Amino acid sequence: MKKADIFEFYRRLAEDNPSPETELEYGNDYQLLVAVVLSAQATDVGVNKATRKLFESVKTPQHMLDLGEDGLKQHIKTIGLFNAKAKNVIALSEILVRDHDGEVPADRDLLETLPGVGRKTANVVMNTAFGAETFAVDTHIFRVGNRTGLAKGKTPLAVEKQLDKKTPDPFRLGAHHWLILHGRYVCKARTPECWRCVVADLCSFKPKSAAPKRKS
Protein backbone atom coordinates (compact mmCIF):
# COMPACT_ATOMS: atom_id res chain seq x y z
CA MET A 1 0.00 0.00 0.00
CA LYS A 2 1.37 3.41 -1.01
CA LYS A 3 2.24 6.05 1.56
CA ALA A 4 -0.61 8.32 0.46
CA ASP A 5 -3.06 5.41 0.59
CA ILE A 6 -1.96 4.51 4.13
CA PHE A 7 -2.62 8.06 5.28
CA GLU A 8 -6.04 8.01 3.63
CA PHE A 9 -6.75 4.56 5.10
CA TYR A 10 -6.26 5.85 8.64
CA ARG A 11 -7.93 9.18 7.90
CA ARG A 12 -11.15 7.43 6.96
CA LEU A 13 -11.06 5.13 9.98
CA ALA A 14 -10.49 8.18 12.18
CA GLU A 15 -13.33 10.09 10.55
CA ASP A 16 -15.63 7.13 11.07
CA ASN A 17 -14.61 6.77 14.74
CA PRO A 18 -12.87 9.91 16.07
CA SER A 19 -12.32 8.61 19.61
CA PRO A 20 -11.45 4.90 19.45
CA GLU A 21 -10.96 3.06 22.72
CA THR A 22 -10.77 -0.43 24.13
CA GLU A 23 -14.03 -2.28 24.73
CA LEU A 24 -12.65 -3.77 27.94
CA GLU A 25 -14.19 -2.21 31.06
CA TYR A 26 -11.80 -1.02 33.77
CA GLY A 27 -11.40 1.72 36.35
CA ASN A 28 -7.62 2.07 36.68
CA ASP A 29 -4.33 0.85 35.22
CA TYR A 30 -4.24 -2.28 37.37
CA GLN A 31 -7.76 -3.33 36.40
CA LEU A 32 -6.85 -2.74 32.75
CA LEU A 33 -3.82 -5.00 33.09
CA VAL A 34 -5.91 -7.74 34.68
CA ALA A 35 -8.62 -7.43 32.03
CA VAL A 36 -6.13 -7.68 29.18
CA VAL A 37 -4.48 -10.75 30.74
CA LEU A 38 -7.91 -12.36 31.07
CA SER A 39 -8.85 -11.48 27.49
CA ALA A 40 -6.31 -13.84 25.91
CA GLN A 41 -8.28 -16.34 23.80
CA ALA A 42 -11.50 -14.83 25.15
CA THR A 43 -13.90 -12.11 24.02
CA ASP A 44 -14.03 -8.65 25.56
CA VAL A 45 -17.75 -9.21 26.16
CA GLY A 46 -17.03 -12.36 28.15
CA VAL A 47 -14.26 -10.70 30.15
CA ASN A 48 -16.43 -7.68 30.99
CA LYS A 49 -19.22 -9.93 32.18
CA ALA A 50 -16.81 -11.69 34.55
CA THR A 51 -14.97 -8.62 35.81
CA ARG A 52 -17.85 -6.25 36.54
CA LYS A 53 -18.53 -7.81 39.93
CA LEU A 54 -14.83 -8.53 40.52
CA PHE A 55 -13.75 -4.94 39.97
CA GLU A 56 -16.33 -3.61 42.41
CA SER A 57 -14.13 -4.83 45.25
CA VAL A 58 -10.76 -5.51 43.62
CA LYS A 59 -9.13 -2.24 42.65
CA THR A 60 -5.47 -2.84 43.60
CA PRO A 61 -2.98 -5.73 43.54
CA GLN A 62 -3.32 -6.05 47.30
CA HIS A 63 -7.09 -6.39 47.00
CA MET A 64 -6.49 -9.23 44.55
CA LEU A 65 -4.11 -10.96 46.95
CA ASP A 66 -6.67 -10.55 49.73
CA LEU A 67 -9.27 -12.21 47.50
CA GLY A 68 -6.92 -15.09 46.75
CA GLU A 69 -6.63 -17.48 43.83
CA ASP A 70 -9.70 -19.55 44.70
CA GLY A 71 -11.78 -16.42 45.16
CA LEU A 72 -10.62 -15.07 41.81
CA LYS A 73 -11.50 -18.33 40.09
CA GLN A 74 -15.09 -18.01 41.26
CA HIS A 75 -15.34 -14.67 39.46
CA ILE A 76 -13.66 -15.71 36.19
CA LYS A 77 -14.69 -19.34 35.82
CA THR A 78 -16.74 -18.48 32.72
CA ILE A 79 -13.56 -17.37 30.91
CA GLY A 80 -11.45 -19.85 28.98
CA LEU A 81 -8.25 -21.07 30.66
CA PHE A 82 -9.42 -19.48 33.92
CA ASN A 83 -7.27 -21.71 36.14
CA ALA A 84 -4.01 -20.67 34.49
CA LYS A 85 -5.14 -17.05 34.24
CA ALA A 86 -6.04 -16.92 37.93
CA LYS A 87 -2.60 -18.25 38.83
CA ASN A 88 -0.93 -15.63 36.63
CA VAL A 89 -3.03 -12.75 37.97
CA ILE A 90 -2.21 -13.66 41.56
CA ALA A 91 1.49 -14.03 40.69
CA LEU A 92 1.71 -10.70 38.85
CA SER A 93 -0.17 -9.01 41.70
CA GLU A 94 2.41 -10.32 44.16
CA ILE A 95 5.21 -8.89 42.02
CA LEU A 96 3.50 -5.51 41.68
CA VAL A 97 3.09 -5.27 45.46
CA ARG A 98 6.61 -6.51 46.20
CA ASP A 99 8.62 -4.73 43.53
CA HIS A 100 6.54 -1.81 42.23
CA ASP A 101 4.70 -0.37 45.24
CA GLY A 102 1.45 -1.78 43.89
CA GLU A 103 1.70 0.27 40.68
CA VAL A 104 1.65 -0.93 37.08
CA PRO A 105 5.03 -0.02 35.55
CA ALA A 106 4.94 2.25 32.50
CA ASP A 107 7.64 0.18 30.83
CA ARG A 108 7.02 -2.49 28.20
CA ASP A 109 10.07 -4.55 29.10
CA LEU A 110 9.08 -4.63 32.78
CA LEU A 111 5.50 -5.49 31.91
CA GLU A 112 6.68 -8.44 29.85
CA THR A 113 8.42 -9.90 32.91
CA LEU A 114 5.06 -10.28 34.66
CA PRO A 115 3.38 -13.73 34.59
CA GLY A 116 0.80 -13.98 31.82
CA VAL A 117 1.95 -10.77 30.13
CA GLY A 118 3.32 -11.16 26.63
CA ARG A 119 4.27 -8.50 24.11
CA LYS A 120 0.69 -8.02 22.88
CA THR A 121 -0.65 -7.49 26.41
CA ALA A 122 2.21 -5.15 27.27
CA ASN A 123 1.57 -3.13 24.11
CA VAL A 124 -2.13 -2.77 24.93
CA VAL A 125 -1.38 -1.53 28.45
CA MET A 126 1.32 0.84 27.26
CA ASN A 127 -0.99 2.32 24.63
CA THR A 128 -4.22 2.49 26.62
CA ALA A 129 -2.92 3.33 30.08
CA PHE A 130 0.16 5.38 29.28
CA GLY A 131 -0.46 6.82 25.82
CA ALA A 132 2.47 5.06 24.17
CA GLU A 133 2.49 4.66 20.39
CA THR A 134 2.51 0.88 20.46
CA PHE A 135 0.85 -1.61 18.12
CA ALA A 136 -0.65 -4.65 19.84
CA VAL A 137 -1.15 -7.26 17.13
CA ASP A 138 -3.91 -9.73 17.95
CA THR A 139 -5.68 -12.04 15.49
CA HIS A 140 -7.88 -9.19 14.21
CA ILE A 141 -5.01 -6.80 13.51
CA PHE A 142 -2.87 -9.59 12.04
CA ARG A 143 -5.70 -10.37 9.63
CA VAL A 144 -6.44 -6.74 8.73
CA GLY A 145 -2.77 -5.94 8.20
CA ASN A 146 -2.25 -8.84 5.83
CA ARG A 147 -5.61 -8.84 4.08
CA THR A 148 -5.67 -5.13 3.28
CA GLY A 149 -1.99 -4.88 2.41
CA LEU A 150 -1.48 -2.24 5.10
CA ALA A 151 1.12 -4.28 6.98
CA LYS A 152 2.00 -7.72 5.71
CA GLY A 153 3.93 -10.21 7.80
CA LYS A 154 4.09 -13.91 8.60
CA THR A 155 4.16 -13.33 12.35
CA PRO A 156 2.48 -10.86 14.74
CA LEU A 157 5.87 -9.28 15.43
CA ALA A 158 6.50 -8.79 11.72
CA VAL A 159 3.12 -7.09 11.32
CA GLU A 160 3.80 -4.96 14.41
CA LYS A 161 7.10 -3.76 12.95
CA GLN A 162 5.42 -2.90 9.65
CA LEU A 163 2.71 -0.93 11.43
CA ASP A 164 5.31 0.90 13.50
CA LYS A 165 7.24 1.76 10.35
CA LYS A 166 4.31 2.77 8.14
CA THR A 167 1.74 4.40 10.43
CA PRO A 168 1.98 8.21 10.14
CA ASP A 169 2.15 10.52 13.15
CA PRO A 170 -1.43 11.78 13.33
CA PHE A 171 -2.75 8.23 13.73
CA ARG A 172 -0.12 6.34 15.71
CA LEU A 173 -1.81 6.54 19.11
CA GLY A 174 -5.23 5.39 17.92
CA ALA A 175 -4.08 2.93 15.25
CA HIS A 176 -4.32 -0.14 17.47
CA HIS A 177 -7.94 0.58 18.39
CA TRP A 178 -9.03 1.51 14.87
CA LEU A 179 -7.57 -1.67 13.41
CA ILE A 180 -8.89 -4.05 16.05
CA LEU A 181 -12.40 -2.60 15.87
CA HIS A 182 -12.29 -2.71 12.08
CA GLY A 183 -11.28 -6.36 12.19
CA ARG A 184 -13.87 -7.21 14.83
CA TYR A 185 -16.88 -5.61 13.17
CA VAL A 186 -16.15 -5.10 9.46
CA CYS A 187 -13.11 -7.00 8.18
CA LYS A 188 -14.29 -10.23 9.79
CA ALA A 189 -12.43 -13.51 9.54
CA ARG A 190 -14.87 -15.63 7.56
CA THR A 191 -16.73 -13.03 5.52
CA PRO A 192 -15.41 -9.47 5.48
CA GLU A 193 -18.24 -6.99 5.04
CA CYS A 194 -16.62 -5.12 2.17
CA TRP A 195 -19.89 -3.53 1.06
CA ARG A 196 -19.88 -1.29 4.15
CA CYS A 197 -16.13 -0.84 4.54
CA VAL A 198 -14.92 2.77 4.41
CA VAL A 199 -11.51 1.73 3.07
CA ALA A 200 -12.58 -0.97 0.60
CA ASP A 201 -11.18 0.83 -2.43
CA LEU A 202 -7.75 1.07 -0.76
CA CYS A 203 -7.66 -2.59 0.22
CA SER A 204 -5.79 -5.24 -1.76
CA PHE A 205 -8.22 -8.04 -0.83
CA LYS A 206 -9.94 -9.64 -3.81
CA PRO A 207 -12.64 -10.51 -4.49
CA LYS A 208 -14.59 -7.99 -2.43
CA SER A 209 -17.59 -9.54 -0.72
CA ALA A 210 -20.99 -8.30 -1.76
CA ALA A 211 -23.86 -7.32 0.49
CA PRO A 212 -26.10 -10.28 1.35
CA LYS A 213 -29.27 -10.49 -0.72
CA ARG A 214 -32.50 -9.75 1.05
CA LYS A 215 -34.94 -12.60 1.34
CA SER A 216 -38.15 -11.94 -0.55
Image (tube, helix red, strand yellow):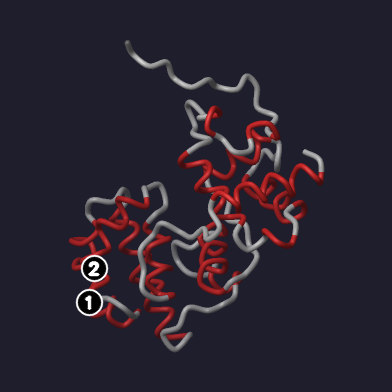
Q: Residues within 10 Å of mark 1 (few under 14, many from 20)?
A: few
Percent x, y of residue 168? 75, 57
**For mark 2, does the 10 Å Cα neighbourhood hold few (<14), some (14 to 19), or many (20 or more) residues?**
some
Q: In the displayed structure, does residue 23 sit left or right of residue 74?
A: right
The residue located at (40%, 76%) in the rendering is 28
Q: Quadrant of the N terminus?
A: top right
Mark 1, residue position: 57
At mark 1, the secondary structure is helix
Instruction: Give the spatial CA distance, label 1 vs label 2.
Output: 6 Å
Q: Which residue is mark 2?
A: 54
Number of disc labels:
2
Q: Among all residues in the image, which is located at the extreme right?
A: 3
Q: From what the image shows, is residue 200 above or below residue 134?
A: above
Which quadrant of the figure contains the C terminus?
A: top left
Nearer to me, 212 or 159: 212
Say if 142 sits above or below 30 in the image.
Answer: above
Give the residue drawn at x 19%, y 68%.
71
- Left/right of residue 200 with respect to residue 181 in the rendered view: right
Judged left or right of residue 152, residue 51 is left
Q: Amino acid at mark 2?
A: Leu
Name which residue type carries label 1. Answer: Ser
Residue 68 placement: quadrant? bottom left
Where is residue 74? Give x, y as percent.
18, 61
Q: Are marks 1 and 2 in contact (CB under 8 Å)?
A: yes
Specify the label residue 44 is tagged with.
none
Using residue 196 as the reference point, say whether residue 47 is left or right of it.
left
Where in the figure is residue 75, as x and y percent of width and height?
A: 21, 62
Residue 110: quarter of image: bottom right
In the image, residue 54 sits, relative to residue 78, either above or below, namely below
* Residue at the farthest top position: 216
